[in-house]
Image (tube, rainbow, N blue to C red):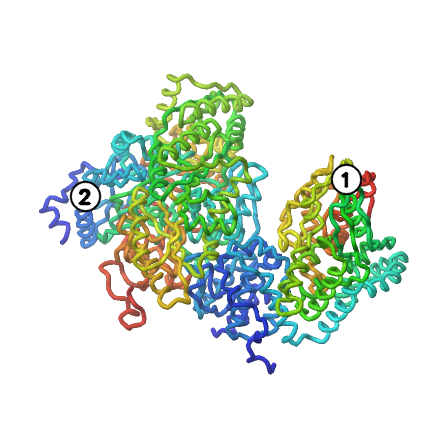
């Protein structure tokens, strides 16, 4: 099928208002939250219903054309980077909250619903949706499902995968299936929902999502403790965890990250602090009160210079706003920067931070650190100026070195941003060829023709016709069409 | 089209690459953008529009599609509030609109309508000429008859949009050239009487002058003043806006006041930008910057000064609507709430989705009636959900827009400008004087 | 190398009629002592086309349908090491054959535990993963899928593959660990797993509520769900139709928190019936009872999963026919275990079919977890697996193209 025929077919399914083909308009979709990579899609469609989305996928399948799903386009790994001969299926118009069932603590939503909208819809009844990525005001639930998004409060409450209990999915051949139990637990069969969440759009498109809603905790207490440096702040984190306390969140920012956030939201961080920790406890009143005193004591013992306790919801919101704006706010102190995302065992924190700082010094670059300290998820922001000859390349190298440092310490190349397009060449450093082949088995079961978000996550596609076993070169690779990174 | 190969922008003040570079493509602006909320399309979001500007700078053509997405921007500046990277979207879209106005051939109909709007609204005298026939038209219920007969619907969409928006006119009430301060004089302030405000909402200007006077301000309203240029500025009619700005600066300089007080959000926001607007004018650049620094919104000045006149109780519930050009463009949110909260017995309720524009946006509801109507409906629903007795805001456009949207639902709600509520409290007026209106 | 070679090396030996899976005798048995040996065994089995099943503690061998054949039964008993306990990171890496009880004992000195409390005393880590075993505290901590962060498996062809890792937060690659949770040996052999740990609660306090009707139970669950209380479990025990029932609600954490919550819960539940905070000795006894496998002596046990708010309606559904006997429910999560009296196959099979229809309409399911062979022949242990069954079959085909891993034991004949 040629492009024009496919466009006509898509228009007949979705209507002309939902099909974009004009070059300038298409170009606004050429990248997601990571603007380093850009590809103009052949067509963009904006379905309004699951049926339309299914129709679009089926049309792609019949035409033999690849497709990429996109939600709000806020991903930081290029996971929604279009393919030039493919259709970009944008779920932003599928944004209805279909059902709220508080007695079963579930909400059924369409994939384009924004993360924070879910909480807003149930807050009046004392409930909320727990995963809270920093972009929660704009990122979509469908995107969260694809990326298995985390957030600051995942330390205690887990990730998207722990809060999604049912999915309606359009498979790459257009078949519609239901995964997970939805409102009932333990459905018989394989946990395909578990495999789908976090698969970065490579297994199909979620068109309905059942979410677990949590009752708002009785009490929330938040403090911001300043330290001379990240070492002392890291000690405080260790002693809090060591004391058997599971805070709702422990976040750390270093001096440079504070400088950026301060410029954006005026939190009034203590001057001359080398690091701050935001520690939040939530739960039953009596427990929170008791443990909060202990956290305060442990911070002081670790050398905290000043401790501010959020007096009310507004101040708590301000603490968090500073933290959650930090990435974008770095734009205020540096012309360009990379947002890196890596994970280490939390206990390796001081050592890894020292190494990052040494690596940065060697390259004459600055790194601002913002991270989920409780679970060892680092977000080093590598600052550079693209105008300065060679800086961009050095920054890229440094960003990669940081990932390798994480792997050296038994960590991961991504804690929440995903592999996407950006990090696929690093995946073989974390997993063996056998590991990746085992993952491909899942891919081939869902998408034997490799049409759903091709070229993401995995560096080298293995054709699905191949039998598993000792790895052989991919035919495309042999033909010189693909490259093993 | 012959100009298909020409790049989108010429060298004269295109949207600045440096300002575009501030955008890190994070998307935080999306959910606060009214057109993105309506359509969910990247091109109709601030991030998408900035992207269009960027590819325009890189050489893509300014075609009808590109222009359409710039035109559809309400200029509400909600994205500026949401942006963690500090992108100055206002400057970007204004620069873009100037290029569009200069370089993009519009259809004859579009040109004619825009010309009509800009030959009418910025000119109080012309507007006033319209008042007489309008009052007759409204009193005769001719409008209702025509509407019932479906005749109005046959007018071009934009004309009928204009008809629906026109407020019911009351008595003309002029503000004197000088209103002396009550008691000790604390300030000598200039007051912008505006064009739409002056003609369609004269009582708001009168209330503004009384409240300022009551709180110790001598109020100077230069009788020669014209439009501030906000409508032109926000529509990309740069030269026109500059002419208005120069005239305003000269007029108020001559009046020799401490501050210049504005009671219309859009005007205040534009006047605070005079410095940027006239940055290339050697004669005016410095004067404009100094002038902009003296511009205050009514609520801003009142809170800055602190009240002198006692506020009498007003036992009513009000919903405060943040006009975009007050909240987003000027960052003024706390002051009007504080001013209202200082009135004994008055309860202020917040409107859901407060950050989303009501669709008025200068002349937007005239040139883009469809999205404006949808946004108006959305806002009307949120306003009604508060259950308040009275809707209060500080922009004439918002008042007209929300009233029209409420009427479409067959609902009525009393509405007042902030100045009128404060005036009622200062005068000790019966709350019914506010609630019985409209 | 074929299986015969491994027999010579002593890695594989004849079962001699001493081993079976759900009534199906095993031909050979193997007890690899390392991942490499496990890989060798499975590679040999692949070469010889042997059907393979796996055994941990042996407590779940009756789960699912009887396998079509068991040429080789591979035990994880030789893989019983706790490999790495990073207490500061709240993470443990452990071999599949390690007993859960032994693991907990090893973690306790650090004040930590793996927050899984399945009732089977012999349960191994691998068995808990493969059978998706859970207990009362899943209300608070989730199930094994929520706690597993890394896995090592040996695939049908002997390939050793890993997924996840040893950090709690990690989204690199597909989450194969979850895919293997509850896969019951049909995709390959779980040899190692890594889990996130929780601090051991320092104190506990429990509330009980005496119940007269199913509606009261439903109301109690609803009230707790709407309150900000954070119980570790909400357990319903009911001796059967016409008999009284009891709800046990433990709160675990630090002393002041547990006590305050128990007091608040007693007051809240007092609206429904007679509620009381248990004394220290009683609490200990009640918690111990929660950990006991229900209905060990019953001949037929079914597990019903349902939306938790529909407890009264589900009990009413089950009441029709001979299905409903003693009941034990994780009432907060929507899982209930029913011990049925076994009279005749036909009436039970009919009752199961009818109950499944009603549950399907509620989005729930009914799994026969224990039954005599004649009943197992008459009903599918799992019931319908929904519209994703075709996809599940395709997953199975990719992982086990020759259909040798516990064939026939899983849903839809997988």
Q: Where is residue C124 in the image (x, y as percent from the top left)?
A: 27, 36
Quick one: which residue is furthest to the left in this view?
Answer: C8
> Residue at (38%, 61%) from the top-left corner?
A421
Q: In which quarter of the image is residue A419?
A: bottom left
Q: Which of marks 1 and 2 is in front?
A: 1
Q: Quadrant of residue B89?
A: bottom right
**Frontmost residue, C46 versus C379:** C46
Q: Where is residue A323 in the image (x, y as percent from the top left)?
A: 46, 47
**Frontmost residue, A384 versus A214:** A384
Q: Can residue B129 be seen in this view?
A: yes
Q: For label 1, count other residues whose C-alpha is less than 10 Å away and answer few (under 14), some (14-19) or many (20+).
A: some
Give the chain of mark 1: B
**Frontmost residue, C125 versus C294:** C125
**In this figure, which residue is indicated by the disc labeled 2?**
C27
Is A210 drawn above or below residue A47 in the view shown?
A: above
* Residue B309 - label: 1
Which type of secondary structure does the marked residue at label 1 adopt? Answer: loop
Give the chain of mark 2: C
Q: Is residue C55 visible?
A: no
Is B402 drawn above or below residue B44 in the view shown?
A: above
Is C279 drawn above or below residue C307 in the view shown?
A: above
């Amino acid at each position: 099928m040629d492009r024009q025929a496919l466009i006509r077919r898509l228009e007949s399914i979705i209507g002309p208002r939902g099909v974009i083909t004009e070059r300038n308009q298409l170009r606004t979709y050429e990248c997601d939250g990571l603007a380093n990579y850009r590809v103009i899609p052949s067509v963009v469609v904006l379905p309004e219903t699951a049926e339309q989305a299914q129709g679009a996928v089926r049309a792609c399948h019949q035409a033999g054309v690849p497709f990429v799903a996109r939600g709000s386009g806020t991903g930081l790994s290029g996971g929604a980077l279009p393919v030039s001969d493919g259709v970009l299926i944008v779920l932003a118009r599928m944004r209805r909250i279909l059902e709220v069932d508080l007695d079963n603590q579930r909400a059924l939503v369409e994939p384009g619903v924004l993360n924070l909208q879910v909480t807003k819809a149930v807050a009046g009844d004392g409930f909320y949706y727990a995963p809270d990525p920093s972009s929660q005001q704009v990122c979509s639930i469908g995107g969260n499902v694809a990326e298995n998004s985390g957030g600051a409060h995942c330390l205690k409450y887990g990730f998207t995968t722990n809060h999604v209990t049912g999915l309606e999915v359009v498979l790459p051949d257009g078949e519609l299936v239901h995964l997970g139990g939805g409102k009932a637990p333990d459905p018989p069969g394989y946990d395909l929902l578990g495999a789908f969440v976090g698969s970065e759009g490579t297994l199909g498109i979620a068109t309905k999502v059942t979410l677990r809603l949590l009752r708002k905790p009785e009490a929330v207490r938040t403090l911001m403790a300043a330290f001379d440096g990240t070492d002392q702040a890291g000690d405080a984190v260790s002693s809090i965890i060591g004391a058997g306390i599971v805070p709702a969140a422990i976040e750390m920012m270093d001096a440079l990250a504070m400088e950026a956030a301060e410029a954006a939201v005026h939190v009034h961080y203590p001057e001359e602090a080398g690091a701050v920790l935001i520690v939040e406890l939530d739960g039953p009143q009596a427990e929170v009160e008791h443990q909060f005193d202990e956290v305060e004591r442990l911070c002081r013992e670790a050398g905290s210079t000043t401790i501010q306790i959020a007096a009310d919801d507004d101040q708590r919101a301000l603490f968090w706003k500073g933290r959650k704006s930090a990435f974008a706010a770095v734009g205020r102190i540096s012309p360009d920067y990379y947002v890196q995302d890596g994970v280490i065992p939390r206990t390796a924190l001081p050592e890894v931070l020292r190494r990052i700082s040494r690596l940065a010094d060697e390259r004459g670059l600055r790194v601002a650190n913002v991270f989920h300290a409780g679970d060892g998820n680092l977000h080093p922001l590598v600052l550079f100026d693209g105008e300065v000859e060679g800086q961009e390349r050095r920054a890229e190298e440094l960003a990669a070195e940081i990932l390798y440092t994480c792997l050296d310490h038994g960590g991961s190349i991504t804690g929440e941003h995903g592999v996407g397009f950006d990090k696929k060449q690093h995946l073989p450093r974390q997993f063996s060829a056998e590991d990746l082949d085992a993952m491909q088995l899942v891919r081939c079961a869902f998408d034997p023709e490799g049409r759903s978000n091709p070229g993401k996550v995995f560096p080298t596609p293995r054709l699905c016709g191949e039998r598993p076993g000792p790895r052989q070169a991919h035919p495309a690779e042999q033909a010189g069409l693909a490259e093993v990174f | 089209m012959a100009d298909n190969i020409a790049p989108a922008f010429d060298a004269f003040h295109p949207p600045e690459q440096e300002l575009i570079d501030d955008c890190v493509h994070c998307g935080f602006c999306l959910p606060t953008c009214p057109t993105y909320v309506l359509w969910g399309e990247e091109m109709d979001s601030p991030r998408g529009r900035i992207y269009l500007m960027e590819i325009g700078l890189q050489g893509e053509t300014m075609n009808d599609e590109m222009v359409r997405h710039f035109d559809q921007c309400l200029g509400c500046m909600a994205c500026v509030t949401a942006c963690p990277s500090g992108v100055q979207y206002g400057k970007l879209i204004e620069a873009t609109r100037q290029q569009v106005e200069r370089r993009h051939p519009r259809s004859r109909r579009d040109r004619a309508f825009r010309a009509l709007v800009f030959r009418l609204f910025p000119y109080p005298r012309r507007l006033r000429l319209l008042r007489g026939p309008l009052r007759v038209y409204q009193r005769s219920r001719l409008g209702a008859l025509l509407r019932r007969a479906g005749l109005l619907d046959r007018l071009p969409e934009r004309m009928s949009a204009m008809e629906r928006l026109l407020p019911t006119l009351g008595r003309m009430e002029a503000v004197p050239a000088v209103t002396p301060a009550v008691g000790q004089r604390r300030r000598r302030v200039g007051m912008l009487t505006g064009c739409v405000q002056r003609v369609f909402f004269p009582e708001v200007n009168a209330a503004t002058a009384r409240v300022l006077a009551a709180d110790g301000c001598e109020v100077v309203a230069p009788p020669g003043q014209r439009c501030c240029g906000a409508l032109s500025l926000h529509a990309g009619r740069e030269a026109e806006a500059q002419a208005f700005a120069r005239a305003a600066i000269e007029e108020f300089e001559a009046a020799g006041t401490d501050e210049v007080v504005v009671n219309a959000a859009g005007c205040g926001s534009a006047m605070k930008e005079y410095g940027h607007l006239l940055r290339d004018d050697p004669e005016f650049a410095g004067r404009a910057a100094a002038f902009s620094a003296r511009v205050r919104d009514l609520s801003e000045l009142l809170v800055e000064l602190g009240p002198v006149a006692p506020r009498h109780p007003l036992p009513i519930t009000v919903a405060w609507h943040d006009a975009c050009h007050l909240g987003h463009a000027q960052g003024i949110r706390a002051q009007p709430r504080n001013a209202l909260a200082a009135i004994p017995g008055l309860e202020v309720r917040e409107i859901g989705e407060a950050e989303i524009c009501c669709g008025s946006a200068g002349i937007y509801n005239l040139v883009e009636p469809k999205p404006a109507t949808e946004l108006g409906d959305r806002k009307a629903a949120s306003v009604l959900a508060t259950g308040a007795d009275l809707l209060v805001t500080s922009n004439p456009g918002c008042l007209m827009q929300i009233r029209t949207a409420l009427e479409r639902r067959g609902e009525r709600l009393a509405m007042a400008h902030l100045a009128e509520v404060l005036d009622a409290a200062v005068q000790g007026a019966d709350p019914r004087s506010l609630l019985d209106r409209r | 190398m074929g299986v015969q070679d491994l027999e010579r090396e002593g890695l594989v030996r004849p079962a001699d009629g001493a081993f079976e899976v759900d009534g199906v005798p095993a031909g050979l048995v193997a007890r690899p002592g390392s991942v490499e040996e496990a890989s060798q065994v499975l590679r040999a089995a692949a070469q010889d086309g042997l059907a393979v099943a796996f055994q941990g503690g042996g407590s779940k061998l009756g789960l699912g349908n009887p396998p079509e054949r068991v040429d080789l039964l591979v035990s994880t008993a030789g893989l019983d090491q706790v490999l790495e306990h990073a207490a500061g990171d709240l993470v443990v890496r452990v071999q599949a054959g390690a007993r859960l009880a032994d693991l907990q004992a090893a973690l306790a000195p650090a004040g930590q535990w793996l927050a899984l409390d399945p009732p089977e005393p012999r349960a191994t880590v691998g068995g808990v993963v493969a059978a998706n075993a859970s207990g009362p505290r899943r209300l608070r901590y989730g199930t094994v899928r929520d706690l597993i962060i890394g896995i090592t498996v040996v695939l049908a062809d002997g390939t050793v593959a890993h997924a996840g890792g040893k950090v709690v937060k990690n989204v690199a690659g597909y989450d194969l660990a979850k895919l293997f949770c509850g896969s019951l040996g049909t995709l390959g052999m779980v040899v190692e797993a890594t889990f996130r740990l929780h601090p051991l609660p320092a104190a506990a306090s429990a509330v009980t509520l005496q119940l007269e009707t199913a509606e009261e139970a439903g109301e109690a669950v609803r009230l707790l769900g709407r309150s900000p209380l954070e119980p570790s479990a909400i357990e319903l025990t009911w001796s059967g139709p016409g008999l009284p029932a009891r709800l046990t609600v433990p709160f675990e954490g630090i002393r002041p928190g547990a006590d305050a919550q128990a007091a608040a819960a007693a007051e809240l539940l007092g609206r429904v019936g007679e509620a009381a905070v248990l004394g220290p000795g009683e609490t200990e006894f009640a918690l111990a009872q929660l950990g006991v496998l229900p209905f060990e002596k019953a001949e037929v046990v079914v597990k019903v999963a349902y939306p938790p708010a529909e407890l009264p309606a589900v009990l009413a559904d089950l009441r029709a026919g001979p299905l409903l006997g003693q009941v034990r429910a994780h009432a907060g999560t929507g899982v209930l275990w029913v011990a049925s009296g076994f009279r005749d196959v036909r009436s039970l099979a009919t009752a199961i079919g009818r109950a499944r229809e009603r549950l399907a309409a509620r989005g729930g399911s009914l799994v026969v977890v224990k039954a005599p062979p004649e009943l197992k022949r008459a009903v599918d242990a799992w019931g319908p697996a929904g519209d994703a069954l075709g996809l599940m079959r395709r997953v199975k085909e990719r992982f086990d193209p020759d259909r040798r891993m516990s064939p026939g034991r899983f849903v839809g004949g997988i």
